[in-house]
Image: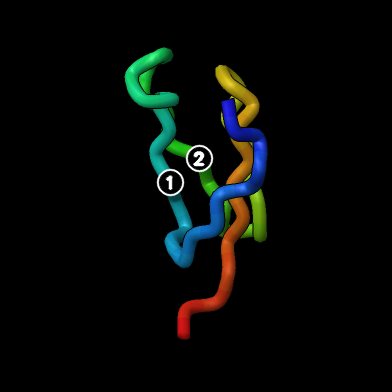
Amino acid sequence: MNKNAIKTTKDTIACSDNGQHPQVFINVKAGSGTCHYCGQRFEKVPSK
């Protein structure tokens, strides 16, 4: 599983690890967040 941070311009992102765990929504409004099921990290980046 890829543990590199996924970059997004959204405030909230969904994660299900391609169906491997229940879908959860992660708030990245503060800059970053991590899925508590699979550990995937998400980082918010400014929109262009």
Could you tell me which secondary element the residue under label 2 belongs to?
A: strand
Residue at position x 47%, y 58% in the image: 11
Q: Would you say 13 lies left or right of 19 here?
A: right
Q: How is the image coloured?
A: rainbow
For this orientation, the residue located farthest to the bottom is: 48
- Up-down: is 14 above or below 8? above
In contact (CB < 8 Å): disc 1 and disc 2: yes
Residue 18, percent from left and from top: 36, 25
Report which residue position mark 1 lands on.
13
- Up-down: is 13 above or below 45? above
Q: Amino acid at mark 1?
A: Ile
Q: Would you say 42 lies left or right of 10 here?
A: right
Q: Quadrant of residue 30?
A: bottom right
For this orientation, the residue located farthest to the front is: 1
- In the rendered image, the quadrant that contains the N terminus is top right
- Up-down: is 32 above or below 45? above
Residue at position x 65%, y 52% in the image: 32
Residue 47, percent from left and from top: 47, 78
